Image: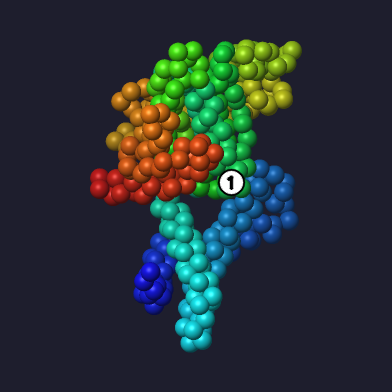
Amino acid sequence: MAATDFSAEIRTLRATYSSIVNVSNVDELKEDIEDLSAQAAAPNLWDNPAAAQKVTSRLSHRQTSLERLRRLDSRIDDLEVLVELSEEEHDAAALEEAERELQSLRKSLQNLEIVTLLAGEYDEREAVVTIRSGAGGVDAADFAEMLLRMYLRWAERKGFPTHILDTSYAEEAGLKSATFEVKAPYAYGTLSVEAGTHRLVRISPFDNQGRRQTSFAAVEVIPLIEQTDSIDIPDNEIKVDVFRSSGPGGQSVNTTDSAVRLTHIPTGVVVSMQNEKSQLQNRAAALRVLQSRLLVLKKQEENAEKKALAGDVKASWGDQMRSYVLNPYQMVKDLRTEHEVGNPSAVFDGEIDDFIDAGIRWRTNSRNAHG
């Protein structure tokens, strides 16, 4: 095996780091931290808990971003020193350690590079994700539940808090739909590349003849509404229905009509919520998601030539963005980026970072190509 050319590798690391620093606009980052620190120090900050939470969250995120840049710079310096000492002393064990650190630094820089590509208007926002079963009957409902678990496992691996807002169970197995929040900075920008139709091919566990079944599920990702977005909905434009929350197999999970369905009459947008404890909480959660969806529609109308933020997702043939094949071979392939892996079980267990990274790069290249 050829010896690693550490000098060339470190030069490459420094070049990548410099390009990230330039894009990250460190001076602006420092100004933001100074401004947010002043806001966080205000004695009346917590008079408005929601606004205070936003200030402290943004401050923490920007401080983490700056610290991450400083730490990477320091790690590259330390690697250079480690290599020099190892080569001078012909220390093979230390050189192996340097090789491991080199690989780790490459990965860290790659991850940071992806974050710098999230520069869309709403990319910094938290995300609301909705998964709906499509064509394919009970297999599609089961597939929707598999995707829900996949995204929740992914968020858990990243340390991102999630909150399930609504689950509508299918009669035999799986889910008709599910909606959840991912409460982390840049969750929308990161997960928005997952929007589209997902396709599953497998031997159906629900077919007593053991036939292969193709089923579909749609994933919608929208940015979470903020108070500054000014989406006011007159009461007379909303139809409110209340009903009893249901669990798997159509079982009623409580004895009161706490679930809420909001219909925005002018657009026909419908949002249901049933996972909160009270009708009031479900209504507040539904209104927040409805506002987020209407914000997306408003921005689409204002700039009609742009592609939809959430996408027009039909969950059927011809609209697929990723295939999960379990039979006759094992493969998950993204049809936009061509990225593929041969281990679907790992993907369904939340290992989707490489698909997301490839999707973000693909989206950036597509935007650049179209001006």
Q: Name the one closer to the observer, 58 or 363.
A: 363
- The secondary structure type at the circle numbered 1 is helix
- Please tell me in which quadrant of the rendered image residue 311 appears: top left
Can residue 336 be seen here? The reply is yes
Residue 5: where, in percent of width, then height?
38, 75
Q: Is residue 211 above or below residue 353?
A: above
Q: Amino acid at mark 1?
A: Arg
Residue 109: where, in percent of width, then height?
45, 62
- Please tell me in which quadrant of the rendered image residue 162 appears: top right
Residue 223: where, in percent of width, then height?
49, 38
- Please tell me in which quadrant of the rendered image residue 309 appears: top left
Q: Which residue is mark 1?
A: 157
Q: Is residue 60 above or below residue 249?
A: below
The mark tally for this picture is: 1
Q: Could you tell me which residue is drawn at 43 percent across and 37 percent down? A: 194
Q: Could you tell me which residue is drawn at 58 percent across and 55 percent down? A: 61
Q: Could you tell me which residue is drawn at 37 percent across and 22 percent down? A: 316
Q: Name the one closer to the observer, 364 or 92.
A: 92
Residue 344 relative to residue 153: left or right = left
Label 1: how many Cα within 10 Å (few below 14, some 14–19, many 20+): few
Residue 283 relative to residue 278: left or right = left
